[in-house]
Amino acid sequence: MQTFTYRTFNQSPSDYERNLADALFSIMGKRVYDPARIADELNKAALKSPHGDAWTAEGLKAEMRRLGAWSNCVGGPVGAHALPGASTRTPA
């Protein structure tokens, strides 16, 4: 069985990541789980995508893949922890 570890660096999320997380928790707290509906809710909340444009379902999925692609996220194999943001995994 492969050994796994938690994050191995100390880095706070950016303001963008915090705002996005707050908005997503609020939206999902209303039982909205469909990517297209989540994108609509993010747009209603006036939270811009990382490129400054409106959210779409595909853009939301791409951003979640990007944010989750860190090689040192929860479940990353020991020894696969590169520098923060320098992922060794290929997003699905």
Image (cartoon, helix red, strand yellow):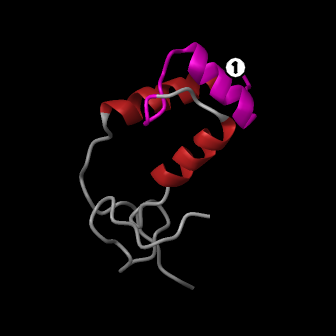
Q: Is residue 14 left or right of residue 31?
A: left
Of the 4 image quadrants, the one containing the N terminus is bottom right
Residue 5 shows up from this direction: yes
Q: Residue at x 27, y 66 (%)?
A: 83
Is 88 placed above or below 30 here? below
Assess whether residue 44 is covered by the magenta stretch.
yes
Residue 28 shows up from this direction: no
Of the 4 image quadrants, the one containing the C terminus is bottom right
Q: Residue furthest left?
A: 10
Q: Is residue 44 left or right of residue 70?
A: right
Viewer-closest of 29 and 89? 89
Viewer-closest of 37 and 27? 37
Is 13 placed above or below 47 here? below
Q: Hey, which quadrant is residue 51 in on the image?
A: top left
Assess whether residue 37 is covered by the magenta stretch.
yes
Given the image, on which type of amino acid does mark 1 rest? Lys
Q: Residue at x 70, y 36 (%)?
A: 35
Q: Residue at x 43, y 36 (%)?
A: 50
Span shown in magenta: 31-52
Count of marks overlaid on the render: 1
- For disc 1, the marked residue is 30
Residue 34: percent from the left, percent from the top? 75, 34
Residue 15: percent from the left, percent from the top? 32, 30
Residue 76: percent from the left, percent from the top? 46, 69
Label 1 neighbour load within 10 Å: few <14, some 14-19, many 20+: few
Query: For the residue labelled by badge 1, is the local secondary structure a helix, a strand or a loop?
Result: loop
Residue 17: percent from the left, percent from the top? 40, 36
